[in-house]
């Protein structure tokens, strides 16, 4: 009942204003027609992109270290700046000023493109994510599919990097990445489809809106109908499949430092390494954004502004990946594929069918 | 330890020798009496025949070590044989070979472990083994000129070989391009998971290992030669710390101390034995902590919690060792005939520190079990991978946790007692799993057993009467064991049986000093464990062997 | 699955209890055991130039140069080559060479680690601890009857 109502509400609501439109109004670009819209869109994209890159910058050199240190009884970076925060600057300078080593025999255009494809595929995904407070670049009819589609381009980047590096470890890493992504993308998308069955739409803003209705109240606290509460099973499945999709422990097989050195990024240094590194963290955050949007009510939350809640949610997902990293061993590649095809896929289809039946019953 | 026991042992040895002489018949050219065992001199062509008989009919299933050396008039290979069931029963098979043409039959068909041992003998001394499947240099580069331990070796001979004369290192890489199903890959010498500078030449079929060959010698530091140039009394003792440098220093020192003390008939005061036992077990805990931590690191893939927790607990053991010995890794604490210092003052504080450590240990181990052994993913990764059946392990001379993880109940501390072990109450940890998980469990259980031993030692030391705390017996400042006295003695180090062969020549320095490294033999089993398995299992198996390259290469 | 959750609970417990094991080294001087063996200190006044330390040194770290009247001229010690086995201190009959607990030494080239007797004399104590009191070896065998107060400066 509830989801259907929510769906009805979502459709009934006026479409929320998107960030480029807001900017057109704000900057008075309306008079410039299409040109004005393009300029506004670019500015908006710049803003959103930079928000994500800033978060990545905080996460990569600083937060990751601090979190890992907390799990391992250490202190981690505390020398440069308050709480060691300026290590971000120091690391950026260090990494960017290193020599970019181009190994002999690399497949040049592909080798150079790979580190660009990876972060940008993740950045593209953020275009359709509603981040609260009207921060959303676009809200197409097929928003969810778009997000998954562009996120999958990352596999291409990884394979390009692995294949073009002229290194066997990179090749192994690239091949592992493909096998893993194929095995886990299907359960991921099928699980997401169960959410779509509830909402009846692929439009991101409507998926978020569908989760705003209250599910039930316990002692005065109203639990919203976030899909994590409506269908915890799907949430858990999605969380796990997402770990594999973004290649974090226990599914960090494409990199697997102790086995294949650093997998597809073995030969990359300096700027290219930074781009790979950025791309990885952007993917973690994109995964977090998708989880937040699909299962945690997007930017919804009490008291604080929506955008803050959105950031909190994706950082919670990031924290979860780091937590898993601290305690969970890595699977072997064959075990991983087995779990993907024999476990996750079956479970996700079961979840889909079950959801379909429930929704069908309710609708009837 | 009464005086009766050695005499009995000598008597047993003599009857054992007579029995074996009857068994071998006219293959025996002569008898030699080594301090530890009867020695039989045989012809170079009879090696396999004699060893087969000794293995199959007399039960000597453990080729502990092969020592090669050059005399003025001959070359000599000594096969030190033992029994896994009872390592006090030993026999040395001495194979003298011609000076001009040192060719001896290979023992490889009898004991697989002879493969590497004979390669090392060929490499360093220059004896050729007929019928050896793969007689190449092992520690030194392929291009090395001469054999460094032979008598006529020219130290000043330049060894720089230009690249064009060196075998193309990439040659093998492209050797089987026709066979496109497999891929050659170098794991190491620079690789995150090789625990030092080890080079594994792997042939992969996709993700599966078809063949793996270890290329060792990157860390060869001529430890045997250095010991041969040091005096027994002082100068050798600092070096054992540097063989297995993973804080197993006291265990290594004990290997040398035991061999040299038996060689020179030095008694060790009982008090010093207790202190030694306690220190050695602390070292064992420290070494096993690192083994568990790095093994987990290989499986987990990052410097994750378990590695850090293991290092933290190891650090505590090291703090105690620092208080005791004055150093955290390179202890140099043992002296022939005892130890250098008594326990640090105030003793109560020191005991307190150890007790605190022991009290915290069960909780820490509980955490390890929660974190690793209880973790289903780790179990999925390690159970039934890296399988080493007991008979294969024996054939390769595997010892220590590797053997005990394969269900071989073999621990020199109990089977060939030294120190104070036979007076204490503890168990040998044995697991039947034969896989990576079993080896992990053995190490964790051994930590518990070591804690038990330390606890009892502390009890003993606390109540030791003050006027009987003799830490060193009276040892002359210059030791000159009798000419041509030979001994092979082993102790149970953290990795397994660490044996020392010493031949005295009447001077204050050994004429031949040979180290039987447990890691050297254990590493040999790697292909047996990982062929046909996946790359991650190869890495896990390597981690579960717990090798230290400093000891493999010496 | 329960094992995995237990593992994660274990690490979370450590994260939440907030204890750390890190020694903030340059800010906080680490605890060093009284017996710890660091850089040598040499007392020319005490030395009787018996060359026992030079003889016992396992890797020829100590070099002593004497003139033709057997008076000591140079006492050089390569602290970068030294393996800190403390045998020189052990054999010294007059406690002329002593390993301090000072482990902090740096140099730009390895040659700067060759200390002569003046440099060895100026090696500072670590935290002003004189380690001789804390190491209690059986010195009687070497020293014979008492040498009086030990004064290295």
Image (cartoon, rainbow, N blue to C red):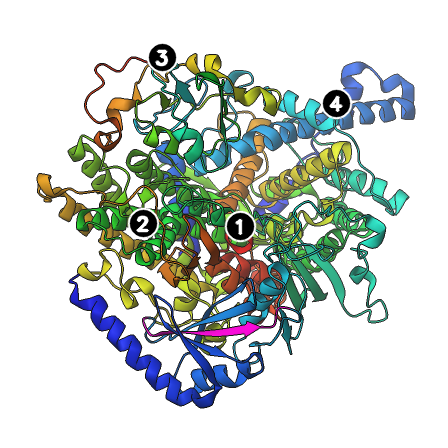
Q: Residue at x 57, y 76 (%)?
A: B108
Q: Which residue is mark 4?
A: A22
Q: Which residue is mark 1?
A: B225
Q: Residues within 10 Å of mark 3 (few under 14, many from 20)?
A: few
Side of A204 where B96 appears, left or right = left
Side of B431 where B537 appears, left or right = right
Q: Residues within 10 Å of mark 2 (few under 14, many from 20)?
A: many
In the rendered structure, which segment of residues is drawn in magenta?
Answer: B88-99
Mark number for residue B280? 2
Q: Which residue is mark 3?
A: C45
Q: Nearer the viewer, mark 1 or mark 3?
A: 3
Q: Residue furthest front?
A: C69
Q: Nearer the viewer, residue A5 or A316?
A: A316
The answer to whether residue C11 is above or below residue C118 is: below
Mark number for residue A149? none
Mainly helix, strand or loop, the magenta region?
strand
Q: Could you tell me if residue A356 is visible in this image?
A: no
Q: Residue at x 31, y 28 (%)?
A: C33
Count of all numbered marks drawn on residues in the image: 4
């Amino acid at each position: 009942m509830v989801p259907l109502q929510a769906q009805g509400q979502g459709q009934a609501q006026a479409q929320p204003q998107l960030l480029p439109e807001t900017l057109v109004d704000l900057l008075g670009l309306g008079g410039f027609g299409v040109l004005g819209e393009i300029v506004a869109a670019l500015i908006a994209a710049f803003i959103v992109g930079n928000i994500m890159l800033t978060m990545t910058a905080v996460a990569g050199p600083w937060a990751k270290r601090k979190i890992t240190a907390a799990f391992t009884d250490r202190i981690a970076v505390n020398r440069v700046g308050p709480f060691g925060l300026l290590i971000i600057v120091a690391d950026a300078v260090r990494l960017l000023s290193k020599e970019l080593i181009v190994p002999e025999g690399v497949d040049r255009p592909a080798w150079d493109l790979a580190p660009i494809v990876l972060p940008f595929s993740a950045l593209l995904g953020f275009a359709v994510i509603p981040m609260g407070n009207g921060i959303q670049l676009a809200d197409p009819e097929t928003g969810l599919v778009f997000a998954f589609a562009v996120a999958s381009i990352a596999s291409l980047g990884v394979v390009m990097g692995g294949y073009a590096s002229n290194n066997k470890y990179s090749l192994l890493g690239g091949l592992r990445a493909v096998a893993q992504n194929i095995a886990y993308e299907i359960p991921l998308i099928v699980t997401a489809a169960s959410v779509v069955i509830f909402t009846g739409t692929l439009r991101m803003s409507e998926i978020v809106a569908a989760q705003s209705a209250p599910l039930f109240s316990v002692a005065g606290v109203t639990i919203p109908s976030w899909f994590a509460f409506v269908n915890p099973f799907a949430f858990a499945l999605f969380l796990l499949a997402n770990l594999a999709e973004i290649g974090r422990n226990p599914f960090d097989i494409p990199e697997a430092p102790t086995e294949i050195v650093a997998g597809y990024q073995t030969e990359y240094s300096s700027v290219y390494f930074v781009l790979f590194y950025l791309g990885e963290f952007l993917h973690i955050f994109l995964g977090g954004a998708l989880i937040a949007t699909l299962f945690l009510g997007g930017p919804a939350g009490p008291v604080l502004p929506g955008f803050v809640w959105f950031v909190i949610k994706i950082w919670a997902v990031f924290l979860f990946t780091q937590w898993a990293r601290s305690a969970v061993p890595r699977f072997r590649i064959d075990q991983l594929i087995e779990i993907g095809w024999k476990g996750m896929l079956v479970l996700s289809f079961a979840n889909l069918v079950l959801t379909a039946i429930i929704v069908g019953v309710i609708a009837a | 330890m009464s005086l009766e026991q050695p005499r009995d042992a000598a008597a047993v040895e003599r009857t054992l020798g007579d029995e074996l002489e009857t068994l071998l018949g006219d293959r025996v050219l002569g008898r030699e009496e080594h301090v530890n065992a009867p020695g039989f001199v045989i012809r170079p062509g009879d090696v396999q025949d004699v060893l087969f008989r000794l293995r199959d009919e007399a039960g000597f299933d453990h080729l502990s070590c092969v020592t090669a050396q050059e005399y003025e008039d001959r070359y000599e290979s000594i096969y030190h044989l033992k029994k896994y069931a009872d390592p006090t029963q030993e026999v040395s098979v001495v194979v003298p070979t011609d000076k001009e043409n040192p060719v001896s039959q290979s023992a490889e068909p009898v004991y697989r472990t002879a493969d590497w041992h004979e390669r090392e003998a060929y490499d360093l001394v220059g004896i050729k083994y007929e019928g050896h499947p793969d007689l190449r240099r092992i520690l030194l580069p392929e291009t090395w000129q001469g054999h460094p331990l032979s008598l006529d070796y020219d130290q000043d001979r330049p060894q720089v070989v230009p690249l064009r004369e060196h075998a193309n290192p990439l040659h093998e890489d492209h050797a089987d391009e026709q066979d496109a199903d497999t891929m050659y890959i170098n794991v190491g010498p620079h690789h995150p998971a090789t625990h030092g500078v080890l080079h594994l030449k792997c042939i992969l079929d996709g993700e599966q290992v078809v063949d793996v060959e270890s290329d060792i010698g990157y860390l060869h530091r001529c430890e045997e030669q250095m010991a041969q140039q040091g005096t027994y009394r002082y100068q050798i003792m600092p070096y054992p710390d540097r063989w297995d440098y993973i804080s197993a220093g006291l265990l290594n020192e004990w290997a040398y101390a035991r061999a040299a003390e038996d060689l020179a008939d030095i008694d060790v005061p009982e008090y010093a034995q207790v202190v030694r036992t306690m220190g050695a077990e602390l070292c064992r805990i420290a070494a096993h902590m690192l083994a568990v931590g790095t093994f987990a690191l290989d499986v987990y893939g990052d410097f994750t919690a378990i590695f850090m927790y293991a290092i933290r607990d190891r650090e505590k053991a090291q703090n105690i060792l620092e208080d005791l010995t004055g150093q955290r890794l390179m202890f140099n604490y043992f002296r022939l005939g005892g130890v250098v210092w008594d326990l640090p003052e105030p003793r109560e504080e020191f005991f307190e520190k150890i007790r605190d450590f022991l009290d915290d240990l069960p909780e820490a181990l509980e955490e390890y079990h929660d974190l690793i052994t209880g973790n289903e993913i780790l179990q999925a990764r390690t159970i039934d991978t890296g399988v080493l059946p007991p008979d294969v392990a024996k054939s390769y001379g595997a010892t220590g946790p590797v053997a005990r993880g394969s269900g071989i109940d073999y621990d020199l501390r109990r089977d060939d007692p030294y120190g104070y072990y036979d007076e204490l109450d503890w168990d040998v940890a044995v697991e039947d799993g034969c896989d990576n998980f079993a080896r992990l469990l053995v190490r964790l259980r051994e930590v518990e057993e070591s804690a038990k031993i330390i606890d009892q030692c502390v009890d003993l030391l606390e109540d030791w009467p003050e006027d009987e705390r003799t830490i060193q017996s009276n040892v002359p400042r210059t030791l000159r064991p009798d000419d041509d006295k030979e001994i092979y003695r082993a102790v149970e180090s953290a990795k397994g049986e660490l044996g020392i062969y010493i031949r005295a020549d009447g001077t204050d320095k050994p004429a031949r000093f040979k180290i039987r490294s447990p890691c050297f033999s254990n590493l040999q089993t790697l292909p047996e464990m990982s062929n046909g398995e996946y790359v991650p299992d190869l890495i896990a198996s390597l981690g579960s062997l717990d090798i230290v390259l400093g000891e493999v290469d010496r | 699955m329960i094992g995995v959750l237990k593992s994660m609970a274990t690490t979370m417990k450590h994260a939440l209890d907030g204890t750390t094991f890190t020694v903030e080294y340059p800010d906080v001087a680490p605890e060093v055991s009284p017996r710890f063996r660091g850089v040598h200190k040499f007392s020319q006044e005490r030395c009787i130039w018996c060359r026992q330390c030079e003889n016992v040194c396992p890797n020829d770290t100590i070099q002593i140069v004497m003139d033709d009247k057997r008076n000591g001229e140079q006492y050089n010690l390569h602290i970068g080559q030294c393996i800190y086995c403390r045998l020189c201190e052990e054999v010294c009959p007059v406690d002329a060479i002593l390993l301090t607990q000072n482990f902090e030494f740096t140099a730009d080239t390895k040659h700067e680690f060759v200390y002569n007797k003046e440099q060895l004399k100026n090696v500072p104590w670590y935290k002003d601890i004189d380690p001789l009191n804390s190491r209690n070896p059986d010195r009687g065998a070497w020293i014979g009857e008492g040498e009086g107060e030990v004064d290295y400066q």
